[in-house]
Image: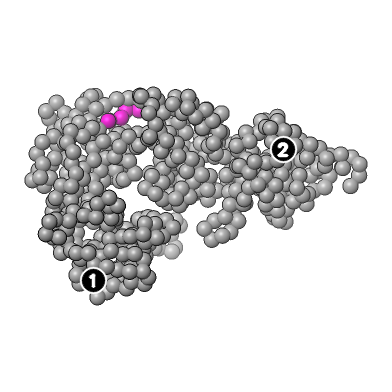
């Protein structure tokens, strides 16, 4: 290389060392690149130096230390701020650096990403199969792309859905993948990793807000006063107005979820005679956005400030008095309902086939009925329960059908005729009694249990790395000659958990409208 080329090459390490020195660092601290908060002037200097060197040497220099280190800074920042059309890729990035990307450049570019991230003390992200995700790694290092922030409400809903699953104990990356059906195809593959990282950090903020003594102070105001650097920890450019609005909205929603739960918890309570009775717990402490209420109830509540919640249907056989109140308020031009319980509704013994219907009234007039999450009746099918660490006589329903948990124990309930089908592939299985209703046999499982019945495979496992998720599966014959997806006959919809597949519960042929309410990490209320 001639003297001029050597001089150009020497400018890169000098520029990178200045960036570190200006931050009081002698070497990279190992955190994500977005935490350095590179300034536009710093990016411009690095870009100028790298363009000069690429023009002289070509893309083969990208795997050298200083070129690679500068390249990943420029690339990650560019992906964060690029607002062009089409899918993300290396071609528009390389054009920004003054050369036309060809397929034979792939080795040079990916080597540059690998060596550059290594120089900053950062890993290359990998997918579930262990394959390197170079493009997604750059996007994660730069933070959530602003192009996605401005892309529509889908990102907000994706983060909300991911946070709901994380609050249930699902790992952030798995939760982001589970909720990725909300994301346009052009964004889905490359944003899942950074969305998982963002959700993990937002969940930490949510947990802190839940325990903080804020004495009525707004969540964002409290964070600004007590956690001055909280924005810098997020993989998103909080200097952008749209990004700031998005994240602050998600944080305030997280605060609402932390304030309480709305839903039904089913369980078992051991009686004095040793038999287990089915129970319900009704929680009416939390927030619901007005637009997420069942449509008929929402329209009738418009303009009202207060409403009452009463039992309805078969629940009237157990309860008769008012159960809670709903109070309207508005925040950031969004109308909310604050639900407050009037009674403590815990360990109510009831038939397992009881459906928990609730009625809403305002000004003495009925407005309609709705179902809380987990309000549907139980059927005599295999169930999974979680033990109560503080009370061996109480169990909490974890799943209808199969379930996998990280906990060391799980209680499996199954009809007596299932016992000969059991295959305990590992660990131990110990009988602990049976239920009064349905006569289900209860077993304490430490390990893995599975069996097949009526064409369905059931599986339970303890001590797993992550909780299992239920997903909807559609089965049917498609028409191959039709563009897109077309069914030859009506498809069948199943609920699938792991290897278990079952039809969703139906009640008297009713058709219900599901609403994405803010009822904590459970399912939303449903109109009846």
Instruction: Tell me where residue 143 appears, x and y as whole percent.
Output: 57, 40
Is the C terminus in the top left, top right, bottom left or bottom right quadrant?
Answer: top left
Q: Is residue 320 left or right of residue 483?
A: left
* Closer to the camera in the image, 476 or 426: 426
Instruction: Tell me where residue 359 appears, x and y as whole percent.
Output: 16, 38
Q: Residue furthest bottom?
A: 420
The reply to whether dot 2 and dot 1 touch (C-beta < 8 Å) is no
Q: Residue at x 28, y 63 (%)?
A: 444
* Image mark for residue 26: 2
Residue 490 visible in the snapshot: no
Residue numbers of the magenta segment: 332-338
* Closer to the camera in the image, 62 or 435: 435
Residue 257 visible in the snapshot: yes
Identify the residue under disc 1. Answer: 418
Indicate the secondary structure of the residue bearing disc 1: helix
**450 over 166 or under it: above or below:** below
**103 over 70 or under it: above or below:** below
Judge whether residue 463 is colored magenta. Answer: no
Between disc 2 and disc 1, whose residue precedes? 2
Q: Residue at x 45, y 36 (%)?
A: 205
Instruction: Tell me where residue 493 appears, x and y as whole percent.
Output: 31, 58
The secondary structure that dominates the magenta segment is strand
Q: Residue at x 51, y 36 (%)?
A: 149
Q: Residue furthest right?
A: 3
Query: Would you identify the image quadrant in which residue 233 lies?
Result: top right
């Amino acid at each position: 290389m001639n003297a001029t080329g050597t001089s150009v090459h020497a400018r890169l390490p000098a520029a990178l060392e200045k960036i570190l020195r200006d931050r009081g660092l002698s070497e990279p601290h190992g955190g994500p690149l977005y935490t350095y908060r590179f300034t536009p002037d710093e990016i411009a200097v690095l870009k100028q130096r790298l363009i000069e060197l690429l023009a002289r040497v070509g893309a083969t220099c990208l795997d050298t230390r200083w070129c690679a280190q500068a390249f990943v800074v420029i690339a990650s920042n560019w992906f964060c701020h690029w607002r062009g059309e089409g899918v993300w890729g290396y071609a528009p990035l390389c054009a920004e650096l003054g050369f036309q990307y060809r397929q034979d450049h792939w080795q040079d570019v990916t080597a540059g990403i690998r060596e550059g991230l290594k120089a900053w003390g950062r890993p290359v992200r990998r997918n579930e199969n262990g394959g390197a995700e170079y493009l997604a790694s750059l996007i994660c290092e730069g933070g959530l792309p602003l192009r996605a922030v401005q892309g529509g409400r889908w990102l907000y809903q994706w983060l909300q859905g991911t946070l709901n699953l994380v609050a249930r104990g699902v790992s952030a990356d798995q939760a982001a993948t589970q909720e990725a059906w909300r994301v346009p195809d052009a964004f889905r593959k490359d944003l899942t990793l950074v969305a998982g990282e963002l959700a993990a950090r937002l969940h930490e903020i949510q947990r802190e807000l839940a325990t903080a003594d804020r004495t009525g102070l707004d969540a964002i105001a409290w964070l600004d006063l007590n956690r001055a650097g909280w924005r810098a920890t997020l993989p998103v450019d909080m200097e952008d107005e749209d990004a700031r609005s998005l994240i602050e909205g998600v944080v305030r929603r997280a605060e609402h979820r932390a304030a309480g739960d709305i839903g039904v918890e089913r369980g078992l309570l051991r009686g004095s005679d040793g038999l287990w009775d089915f129970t319900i717990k009704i929680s009416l402490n939390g927030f619901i956005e007005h637009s997420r209420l069942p449509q008929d109830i929402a329209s009738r509540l418009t303009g009202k400030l207060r409403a009452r919640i009463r039992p309805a249907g078969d629940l009237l056989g157990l309860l008769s008095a008012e159960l809670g109140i709903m109070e309207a308020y508005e925040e950031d031009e969004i109308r909310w309902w604050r639900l407050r319980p009037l009674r403590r509704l815990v360990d109510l013994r009831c038939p397992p086939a009881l459906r928990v219907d609730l009625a809403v009234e305002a000004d003495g007039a009925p407005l309609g009925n709705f179902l809380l999450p987990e309000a549907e009746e139980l059927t005599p099918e295999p169930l999974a329960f979680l033990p109560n660490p503080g009370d061996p006589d109480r169990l909490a329903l974890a799943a209808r059908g199969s379930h996998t948990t990280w906990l060391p124990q799980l209680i499996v309930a199954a009809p007596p005729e299932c016992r000969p089908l059991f295959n305990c592939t590992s660990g131990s299985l110990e009988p602990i009694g049976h239920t009064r209703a349905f006569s289900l046999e209860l077993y304490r499982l430490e390990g893995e249990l599975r069996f097949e019945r009526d064409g369905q495979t059931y599986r339970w496992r303890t001590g797993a790395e992550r909780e299992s998720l239920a997903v909807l599966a559609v089965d049917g014959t498609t028409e191959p000659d039709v563009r897109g997806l077309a069914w030859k006959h009506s498809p069948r919809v199943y609920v699938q958990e792991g290897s278990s597949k079952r039809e969703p519960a139906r009640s008297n042929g009713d058709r219900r409208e599901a609403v994405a309410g803010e009822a904590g990490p459970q399912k939303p209320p449903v109109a009846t």
